[in-house]
Image: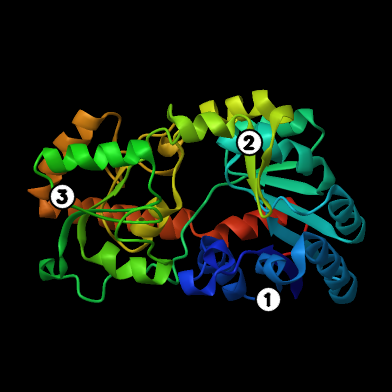
Amino acid sequence: MLRILYAGNKYYNHDPAQGFSFDHSNIYDSLRRLPNLQVVYYEYDRVESVGAKGVNQELLDLVRREKPDAFLSIMYYEDLTFATLDAIKAMTTSIGFFMDDHWHFDNSSKFGAPHLSWVATTYSKAVPKYEKLGCRVIRTHLGANHRLFIPPSNPSPNRFKYDVSFVGAWYHNREQVIHALRRAGISVAVWGPGWPEGRLSDDLMVPVVHATKINIDINPPSSYLGLKPFARFFLKPSKEGIRPDFGNFFNNIREWWQKRTPMIKPRTFNCLAARSFVLTQMTHDLPEYYKLDKEIVAFRSLPELIKKIKYYLKREDERERIALAGYTRTLRDHTYEKRFIEIFQKAGLRYP
């Protein structure tokens, strides 16, 4: 049996009152369901109790005590020191899962990656960058937790409460899109951090997905010109508050610009696993994963989004046919269980 020490956030913002994090509901929940795999779980939420120094020490002690076959971590937790990563790498195979390299590579990922045994990145254009650093890299992607996001038990059209829904964090540019849809006469239900309706945890998202005719993924550039992004060029938030970040000025500008790169979002895979219709913003790699207009529908501009929403709202049979094809493809190729089996095998671990 393969033994993995997995480290990630259990709660959103380390706060139990806000529900489980994406990491917990998708990554950990998928790992724990894999056969012949034992998962030792370290929660980065411990930083609230023991601080960053304590997290590093606890993690090292846990690796020494448990002697796992591999260490797997979601790599946007930046309080792990290079010394800690080096020590873990010396004791076991360490794998970092990098989900935001389209904008996070230059300001974060490239510094920690050389201290890992393997890098798993969801951004294809980061692969040659990692290789240039001498890293062993695995190209992967996000996926679906198909044990949580399941098809509706009642497939009747009467289940629909929402014409269109969107679940995702508030960004200035996303708000502009939502306003434009509503001005066009489209009824849109919205949830997520920063929106008035608030965040939906993944388990609460499932019934919303089932009750929605068209689940949209809007992924306009999250970077925009304004006081807050301008301040971010010079300052950096931390647990101790806002601190100067002048040394990273050019990397901060690069990060701001790279946030304009659209990527496939987790919601895309999960909605399709729930056998629901998805209309998503086009990304450079979407055709690698789904057949356009057969398994998923994409848009490239706001006018096209409005046009396609109005088109598909009137065509239930067509929506259901595409949703079924997307569901079948997702379960065949794009579950987290399949992603991690592939990652483990490419990293030289004997699994399954």
SS class, disc 3: helix
* Amino acid type assigned to the residue bearing label 2 in the image: Leu
Q: Which residue is mark 1?
A: 36
Crowd tier of the residue under label 2, counting other residues whose Cα lies within 10 Å: few below 14, some 14–19, many 20 or above: some
Which residue is nearer to you in this view: 348 or 166?
A: 166
Which residue is nearer to you in this view: 258 or 15?
A: 15
Question: In the image, which is nearer the foreground, mark 1 or mark 2?
Answer: 2
Q: CA distance from mark 1 to mark 3?
A: 40 Å
SS class, disc 2: strand
Please, is residue 135 above or below residue 89 in the view? above
Q: Which residue is mark 2?
A: 235
- Residue, x 35% and y 66% (percent of image)? 205
Quadrant in which the N terminus appears: bottom right
Is disc 1 in contact with disc 3, using a CB cutoff of under 8 Å?
no
In terms of image quadrants, where is residue 5? bottom right
In the visual, does 77 lie left or right of 317? right
- The picture places residue 83, in percent across and down from the top left corner, at 89, 51
* Amino acid type assigned to the residue bearing label 3 in the image: Glu
Q: Determine which of the numbered discs, if any, sits on residue 318 in the image.
A: 3
* Amino acid type assigned to the residue bearing label 1 in the image: Asn
Does any portion of residue 352 appear in the rendered image?
A: no
- The picture places residue 192, in percent across and down from the top left corner, at 37, 56
Instruction: Name which of mark 1 and mark 2 comes first in the sequence.
Output: 1
- Residue, x 69% and y 34% (percent of image)? 245
- The picture places residue 206, in percent across and down from the top left corner, at 34, 68
Q: CA distance from mark 3 to mark 2?
A: 49 Å
Crowd tier of the residue under label 1, counting other residues whose Cα lies within 10 Å: few below 14, some 14–19, many 20 or above: few
Quadrant in which the C terminus appears: bottom right
In the visual, does 35 lie left or right of 270? right
Q: CA distance from mark 1 to mark 2?
A: 46 Å
- Residue, x 52% and y 51% (percent of image)? 142
SS class, disc 1: loop
